[in-house]
Amino acid sequence: FKTQWELLAALESWGIPVAPHRKRCHTLKEVHAWAHKIEHNIRGSLNFAIDGGVVKVDSLRLQEELGVVGGRDPRWAIARKFAPDIAETQLLRIRVNVGRTGAVNPYAELEPVEVGGVIVKLATLHNADLVAKKDLREGDWVQVKRAGEVIPQIIAPIPEKTANRDKVLKPWKMPTHCPSCGTPLEREEGEAAIYCPNVRCPGRQLEGLVHFASREAMDIRGLSYSRIAQLIDAKLVTDPGDLYCLTVDQLLKLDGFAQKGATGLIAAIETSKAQPLSRLLNALGVRHVGTIAAQLLARHFGTMDALLKATARDIGGVRGIGTIIAEGVAGYFRDPSARALIGKLSENGLTLEEPRPAATFGELSGKTVVVTGSLPTLTRTKATELIESAGARVTSSVSKSTTFVVAGADPGSKFAKAKELGVEIIDEAELLRRVGRE
């Protein structure tokens, strides 16, 4: 075969299912017209869900010449995404949950509805201010979409579908006390989030342990949400330090654990002790400290002991770390319970140090890079490790000194800042080329 079109025709003639409604286009104008027709006239009549189409170079020879980036991203094909499906349903209840940092955020329980081929029962509401701004009320009819075809979100209420809405539906009010532990909630000036300040809050403990064990943090395989909840219910674990005191015999007494699973989980916990300081700092759940900030702090201070001795001013002097992060980190380590946790982790043999990377010379040596959005194949941690291995420095904010920004899907404010400052913006494929991983 010489073309993709010929290949698809042959496959179809052999009885192999291929995409219906395909079209061979000769100009970009034809491509746009085809996409518009599929999205607005055909999409709704298909017996399967789609979120877009794919535009491909027809010539198989040109496809081969153009090649594939990173082993999976063809240069000869590009996705054409459609606008997300919007559905109408009823907002049954607005509830709140407690996150690992103590942030208490609302979410919506919905009458189940199909959106983009998926049954949606819950939707994020972000924070109390947005609920008030949209004037969402329990009992409202609402419009729902899946942001990026993934996360269910409520667009707006539909007041006209509820007779005498202002009389029968009351405006929602944010709780004043934590739903998990009953502690009065707090809100810092200038912040949208509302917090439970109780570090012993069961809700915070559960979410904190889930984050601690996650792939981006300590990467403890087999320690799932339900397993952590089980360990907390059994009073075997209240903080991350307790994980490193668990034994196989303790696990075997719990429902669902056999010898192989218990031994494997203890081995995974033991393996995580060798994780570098940067992963531990991310795992601890310090407010405002994510993957990038944790790496900057670990690389600068080198050891947990040095970080414990640092003041907010010392921390704020780290390039790429702002005042808010510095004060958050210093405040966290001033807390006696945080210091006790670090002591427990140290006693159980965790590394608490950051290995010094070998000097690298190459195209990215000495450059400053920011990563934003969701990349097609690389996690934020893997992208950062790849960039740093090529000699560049990854920071958490865009400035005039930023060499370039690697942008993925839903990049947010960093993307806008880069455009405003005229900073170069590249995608994952170009990043892989620059680091020699093409």
Image: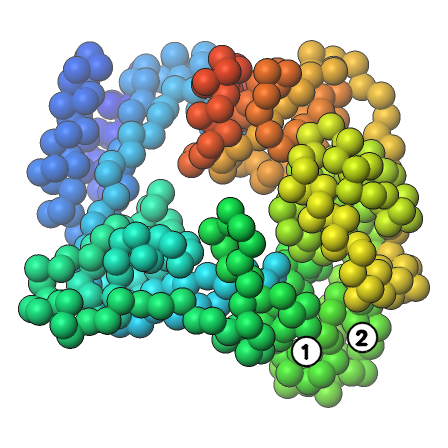
Q: What residue is drawn where x is 26% and y is 58%?
A: 135
Of residue 120 and residue 281, the one placed in the foreground of this image is 281
Residue 368: mark in rendering? none
| Residue 257: x %, y % from top left | 68, 80
For badge 1, the amino acid type reads Leu
Of residue 303 and residue 199, the one placed in the foreground of this image is 199
Q: Residue at label 1? A: 231
Please state if 434 lies on the left or on the right of 18 as rendered: right
* Disc nearer the start of the sequence (1/2): 1
Q: Is residue 383 above or below residue 161?
A: above
Q: What residue is drawn where x is 20% and y is 66%?
A: 140
Count of numbered circles in the view? 2
Question: Quarter holding the C terminus?
Answer: top right
For badge 2, the amino acid type reads Leu
Q: Is residue 359 above or below residue 386?
A: above
| Residue 43: x %, y % from top left | 16, 42
| Residue 362: x %, y % from top left | 74, 13
SS under mark 1: helix
SS under mark 2: loop
Q: Quadrant of residue 350?
A: bottom right
Q: Say whether residue 432 is visible.
A: no
Q: Quadrant of residue 230?
A: bottom right
Residue contact at pointers 1 and 2, CB within 8 angstroms? yes
Q: Is residue 359 above or below residue 362?
A: below
Q: Residue at label 2? A: 246
| Residue 332: x %, y % from top left | 74, 55
Please state if 403 lies on the left or on the right of 407 as rendered: right
Of residue 215 and residue 305, the one placed in the foreground of this image is 305
